[in-house]
Protein backbone atom coordinates (compact mmCIF):
# COMPACT_ATOMS: atom_id res chain seq x y z
CA UNK A 1 0.00 0.00 0.00
CA UNK A 2 1.33 3.40 -0.97
CA UNK A 3 2.32 5.53 2.01
CA UNK A 4 0.11 8.57 2.59
CA UNK A 5 1.35 11.98 3.70
CA UNK A 6 -0.11 13.42 6.89
CA UNK A 7 -0.21 17.09 7.81
CA UNK A 8 -0.69 17.72 11.53
CA UNK A 9 -2.06 20.98 12.92
CA UNK A 10 -1.28 21.46 16.61
CA UNK A 11 -1.34 24.42 18.97
CA UNK A 12 0.21 22.99 22.13
CA UNK A 13 2.26 20.24 23.74
CA UNK A 14 1.74 17.75 20.91
CA UNK A 15 1.42 14.44 22.76
CA UNK A 16 -1.07 13.21 20.15
CA UNK A 17 1.30 14.33 17.42
CA UNK A 18 3.98 12.25 19.15
CA UNK A 19 1.78 9.16 19.21
CA UNK A 20 1.05 9.62 15.49
CA UNK A 21 4.74 10.11 14.61
CA UNK A 22 5.69 7.07 16.73
CA UNK A 23 3.03 4.88 15.11
CA UNK A 24 4.22 5.91 11.64
CA UNK A 25 7.85 5.29 12.57
CA UNK A 26 6.94 1.86 13.97
CA UNK A 27 5.28 0.95 10.68
CA UNK A 28 1.83 0.67 12.28
CA UNK A 29 0.33 3.23 9.87
CA UNK A 30 1.13 3.24 6.14
CA UNK A 31 1.86 6.97 6.34
CA UNK A 32 4.44 9.55 7.28
CA UNK A 33 4.01 12.91 8.96
CA UNK A 34 5.07 15.22 6.14
CA UNK A 35 4.60 18.53 7.93
CA UNK A 36 3.53 19.94 11.30
CA UNK A 37 1.93 23.38 11.32
CA UNK A 38 1.17 25.42 14.42
CA UNK A 39 -0.68 28.67 14.97
CA UNK A 40 1.51 29.08 18.05
CA UNK A 41 5.23 29.53 17.47
CA UNK A 42 5.95 28.40 21.07
CA UNK A 43 4.07 25.12 20.71
CA UNK A 44 6.11 22.17 21.95
CA UNK A 45 4.55 20.24 19.07
CA UNK A 46 6.89 22.11 16.70
CA UNK A 47 9.90 21.05 18.77
CA UNK A 48 8.75 17.41 18.71
CA UNK A 49 8.49 17.58 14.93
CA UNK A 50 11.96 19.11 14.56
CA UNK A 51 13.43 16.42 16.83
CA UNK A 52 11.92 13.83 14.52
CA UNK A 53 13.37 15.59 11.47
CA UNK A 54 9.93 16.63 10.26
CA UNK A 55 9.29 20.02 8.73
CA UNK A 56 7.77 22.26 11.44
CA UNK A 57 6.15 25.54 10.47
CA UNK A 58 4.60 28.25 12.65
CA UNK A 59 1.86 30.30 10.98
CA UNK A 60 0.71 33.28 12.98
CA UNK A 61 -2.89 34.18 12.22
CA UNK A 62 -2.29 37.82 13.16
CA UNK A 63 0.07 38.10 10.16
CA UNK A 64 -2.95 37.74 7.85
CA UNK A 65 -5.84 40.12 7.17
CA UNK A 66 -8.48 37.44 7.76
CA UNK A 67 -9.02 33.77 8.46
CA UNK A 68 -9.52 32.89 4.79
CA UNK A 69 -6.08 34.28 3.90
CA UNK A 70 -4.53 32.51 6.90
CA UNK A 71 -6.07 29.22 5.83
CA UNK A 72 -5.05 29.73 2.18
CA UNK A 73 -1.47 29.95 3.38
CA UNK A 74 -1.88 26.74 5.40
CA UNK A 75 -3.39 25.03 2.35
CA UNK A 76 -0.37 26.08 0.28
CA UNK A 77 1.97 24.47 2.83
CA UNK A 78 -0.15 21.31 2.96
CA UNK A 79 -0.21 21.07 -0.84
CA UNK A 80 3.54 21.67 -1.10
CA UNK A 81 3.98 18.68 1.20
CA UNK A 82 1.48 16.63 -0.84
CA UNK A 83 -0.66 16.02 2.21
CA UNK A 84 -3.54 13.54 1.84
CA UNK A 85 -4.97 13.75 5.34
CA UNK A 86 -4.97 16.65 7.81
CA UNK A 87 -4.93 15.62 11.48
CA UNK A 88 -5.91 18.20 14.06
CA UNK A 89 -4.10 17.38 17.29
CA UNK A 90 -4.89 19.97 19.91
CA UNK A 91 -5.44 22.64 17.25
CA UNK A 92 -7.23 25.37 19.17
CA UNK A 93 -9.18 26.96 16.31
CA UNK A 94 -12.37 26.19 14.51
CA UNK A 95 -11.52 25.17 10.94
CA UNK A 96 -12.99 27.66 8.47
CA UNK A 97 -14.70 26.96 5.16
CA UNK A 98 -11.52 27.72 3.17
CA UNK A 99 -9.58 24.82 4.68
CA UNK A 100 -12.66 22.59 4.94
CA UNK A 101 -13.43 22.96 1.24
CA UNK A 102 -9.85 22.31 0.20
CA UNK A 103 -9.69 19.08 2.24
CA UNK A 104 -13.32 17.94 2.25
CA UNK A 105 -13.65 14.63 4.11
CA UNK A 106 -9.92 14.63 4.72
CA UNK A 107 -9.63 16.40 8.08
CA UNK A 108 -9.75 14.49 11.37
CA UNK A 109 -9.83 15.65 14.96
CA UNK A 110 -9.50 14.07 18.40
CA UNK A 111 -11.76 15.30 21.15
CA UNK A 112 -11.33 14.38 24.85
CA UNK A 113 -14.95 13.42 25.56
CA UNK A 114 -17.61 11.10 24.23
CA UNK A 115 -19.22 13.28 21.58
CA UNK A 116 -21.82 14.59 21.16
CA UNK A 117 -21.46 15.19 24.92
CA UNK A 118 -19.15 17.95 26.09
CA UNK A 119 -17.93 19.53 22.84
CA UNK A 120 -15.68 22.59 22.86
CA UNK A 121 -12.90 23.43 25.26
CA UNK A 122 -11.91 21.28 28.25
CA UNK A 123 -14.10 18.27 27.47
CA UNK A 124 -12.52 16.26 30.28
CA UNK A 125 -13.26 18.91 32.89
CA UNK A 126 -16.79 19.47 31.59
CA UNK A 127 -17.51 15.72 31.94
CA UNK A 128 -15.92 15.52 35.40
CA UNK A 129 -17.91 18.54 36.65
CA UNK A 130 -21.12 17.13 35.24
CA UNK A 131 -20.62 13.95 37.27
CA UNK A 132 -20.75 11.34 34.51
CA UNK A 133 -19.64 7.81 35.41
CA UNK A 134 -17.98 7.21 32.05
CA UNK A 135 -16.25 9.52 29.66
CA UNK A 136 -13.64 9.00 26.96
CA UNK A 137 -12.49 10.35 23.65
CA UNK A 138 -13.69 10.58 20.07
CA UNK A 139 -11.92 10.70 16.72
CA UNK A 140 -14.14 12.30 14.10
CA UNK A 141 -14.06 13.87 10.68
CA UNK A 142 -14.24 17.63 10.84
CA UNK A 143 -17.16 19.62 9.51
CA UNK A 144 -18.10 23.27 9.97
CA UNK A 145 -19.39 22.82 13.53
CA UNK A 146 -17.68 22.60 16.89
CA UNK A 147 -16.76 18.89 17.26
CA UNK A 148 -19.84 17.85 15.26
CA UNK A 149 -18.46 15.81 12.35
CA UNK A 150 -19.04 12.08 11.67
CA UNK A 151 -17.58 9.86 14.38
CA UNK A 152 -14.85 7.37 13.43
CA UNK A 153 -13.78 5.79 16.73
CA UNK A 154 -14.50 6.27 20.42
CA UNK A 155 -12.95 4.86 23.59
CA UNK A 156 -14.64 4.80 26.99
CA UNK A 157 -12.99 5.23 30.38
CA UNK A 158 -14.58 5.03 33.84
CA UNK A 159 -14.76 8.07 36.11
CA UNK A 160 -13.95 7.24 39.75
CA UNK A 161 -15.08 9.03 42.89
CA UNK A 162 -11.48 9.91 43.75
CA UNK A 163 -10.79 11.39 40.31
CA UNK A 164 -9.86 14.99 39.78
CA UNK A 165 -10.31 16.59 36.42
CA UNK A 166 -6.56 16.01 35.88
CA UNK A 167 -6.53 12.30 36.71
CA UNK A 168 -9.51 11.80 34.43
CA UNK A 169 -7.74 13.74 31.67
CA UNK A 170 -4.69 11.46 32.03
CA UNK A 171 -6.82 8.33 31.72
CA UNK A 172 -8.51 9.77 28.63
CA UNK A 173 -5.18 10.83 27.10
CA UNK A 174 -3.89 7.25 27.19
CA UNK A 175 -6.86 6.25 25.07
CA UNK A 176 -6.39 9.23 22.73
CA UNK A 177 -2.89 8.00 22.00
CA UNK A 178 -4.34 4.59 21.12
CA UNK A 179 -7.38 5.46 19.00
CA UNK A 180 -6.05 8.43 17.02
CA UNK A 181 -3.28 6.44 15.31
CA UNK A 182 -5.78 3.60 14.84
CA UNK A 183 -8.28 5.89 13.07
CA UNK A 184 -5.50 7.28 10.88
CA UNK A 185 -4.42 3.74 10.02
CA UNK A 186 -7.97 2.86 8.95
CA UNK A 187 -8.12 5.98 6.78
CA UNK A 188 -4.73 5.29 5.20
CA UNK A 189 -5.77 1.72 4.43
CA UNK A 190 -8.91 3.10 2.69
CA UNK A 191 -11.16 1.37 5.22
CA UNK A 192 -13.32 4.35 6.18
CA UNK A 193 -16.46 5.13 4.24
CA UNK A 194 -18.38 8.27 5.13
CA UNK A 195 -22.09 7.69 4.70
CA UNK A 196 -23.94 10.78 5.88
CA UNK A 197 -23.38 11.03 9.60
CA UNK A 198 -22.07 7.48 9.79
CA UNK A 199 -18.56 6.31 9.20
CA UNK A 200 -18.48 2.65 8.21
CA UNK A 201 -15.33 0.67 8.84
CA UNK A 202 -14.61 -1.96 6.21
CA UNK A 203 -13.14 -5.15 7.58
C1 LIG B 1 -6.03 16.57 23.68
O1 LIG B 1 -6.68 16.32 24.88
C2 LIG B 1 -7.00 16.51 22.53
O2 LIG B 1 -8.02 15.61 22.73
C3 LIG B 1 -7.55 17.91 22.50
O3 LIG B 1 -6.47 18.74 22.82
C4 LIG B 1 -5.53 18.00 23.59
C5 LIG B 1 -4.22 18.09 22.88
O4 LIG B 1 -3.18 17.49 23.60
N1 LIG B 1 -8.13 18.18 21.20
P1 LIG B 1 -1.79 17.25 22.92
O5 LIG B 1 -1.30 18.62 22.44
O6 LIG B 1 -1.97 16.30 21.79
O7 LIG B 1 -0.91 16.71 24.00
Image (spheres, rainbow, N blue to C red):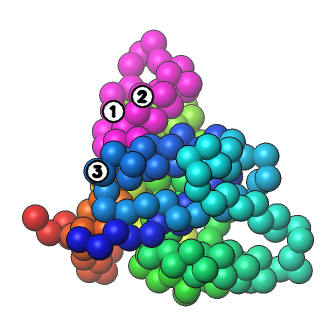
Looking at the image, do the residues carrying marks 1 and 2 touch, with CB atoms under 8 Å apart? yes
Q: Is mark 3 within 8 Å of ligand 1?
A: no
Q: Position of residue 90 (x, y in %)?
A: 59, 51
Relative to 149, 186 lies left or right: left
Relative to 71, 124 lies left or right: left
> Of the residues under marks 3 and 1, which one precedes in the sequence?
3
Residue ID for mark 3: 28
Relative to 203, 160 lies left or right: right
* CA separation in Å, label 3 and label 2: 23 Å
Q: Residue furthest left?
A: 203
Instruction: Residue at 34% x, 69% y: name it.
Output: 3
Instruction: Residue at 46% x, 35% y: name it.
Output: 173
The answer to whether residue 8 is visible is yes
Q: Position of residue 121 (x, y in %)?
A: 62, 48
The secondary element bearing badge 2 is classed as helix
Q: Magenta stretch containing residue 75, yes or no?
A: no
The secondary element bearing badge 1 is classed as strand
Which residues, given as a range, are shown in magenta?
155-178
Q: Nearer the viewer, mark 3 or mark 2?
A: 3
Relative to 56, 104 lies left or right: left
Q: Residues within 10 Å of mark 1 (few under 14, many from 20)?
A: some
Q: Residues within 10 Å of mark 3 (few under 14, many from 20)?
A: some
> Of the residues under marks 1 and 2, which one precedes in the sequence?
1
Residue ID for mark 2: 171
Check residue 157 in the rendering and tell me which mark sits there, or answer none: 1
Amino acid sequence: MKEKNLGVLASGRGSNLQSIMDSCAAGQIPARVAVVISDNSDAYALERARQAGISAIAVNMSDFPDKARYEQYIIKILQEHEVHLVCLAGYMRLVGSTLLDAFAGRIMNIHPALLPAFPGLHGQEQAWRYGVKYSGCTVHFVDGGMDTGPIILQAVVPVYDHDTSDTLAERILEQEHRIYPEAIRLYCEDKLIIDGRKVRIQT
